[in-house]
Image (tube, grey):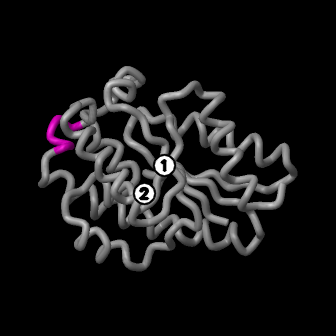
Amino acid sequence: MYLCLEGIDGSGKSTQLAMLGEWLEKCGLEVLRVYEPTESPPGQLIREMLTDPRATTPHFQRILGLLFAADRMMLMDRIGEAEKQEKIVISDRSFYSSLAYQSDPDWILEINRHIKKPDLVILLDVDVEQAINRFEGKDHFENPEFLGKVRKNYLKLAQNHNFSVVNANHSVRKVHEDIKTILSSRIRI
């Protein structure tokens, strides 16, 4: 199974991914944790570009869309191999992030057409103000207007693609319990 946690910056994806991985391993399952961007050369370039003040501009978003697609292509072999070994793949982001963050969905779908889609997407939905309060100030996505637009995009994707939505305004523990409830009905634990 390929499971992805999605949400705006500050929604708690990394924290929940770590907790989820530990829980699944305690349940006796083998887990592969992946993150977007990865540590590949395109992923490293993405991380660098995210610190640029122009990172939220349409031009930079198109560049980032291409880089994320390249980074994901490099990740597909690892995901495929893990699934052959019957591991649970849990990911912090997937191509749905590009659909939420970048502005041309048809183009994003085209450049990601060879990307494996997650079997299950859990959207960690958080209020923009709370998300901004959680930031460490590393990139330029602290713009409330931009994040508000991305959050709306995520909620629309959730509706159109049948994501499971978790209220990430709650405590870390409550969000983790909600994620466990969703997964307990889909995998043998």
Where's the N terminus, which quadrant? bottom right
Type of residue at label 2? Ala
Report the residue at 42% width, 57% height from top: 158
Which span of residues is magenta-colored?
A: 52-56
Q: How many numbered circles are shown?
A: 2
User: What kind of secondary structure does the magenta stretch mostly adopt?
Assistant: loop
Q: Which mark is residue 33?
A: none
Please say if 168 is above or below 25.
above
Compare marks 1 and 2 and give the one earlier in the sequence: 1
Q: Is residue 183 magenta?
A: no
Where residue 149 appears, as percent x and y from the top left, is 23, 45
SS type, badge 2: helix
Q: For this view, does 160 lie left or right of residue 176? A: left
Where residue 20 appears, as percent x and y from the top left, is 68, 43
Q: Which residue is mark 1?
A: 123
Q: Residues within 10 Å of mark 2 (few under 14, many from 20)?
A: some
Q: Are marks 1 and 2 in contact (CB under 8 Å)?
A: yes
Quadrant of the image occupied by residue 133: top left
Residue farthest toward the top in the current orientation of the protein:
133
Q: Which mark is residue 158?
A: 2
Report the residue at 44% width, 70% height from top: 73
Where's the C terminus, which quadrant? bottom right
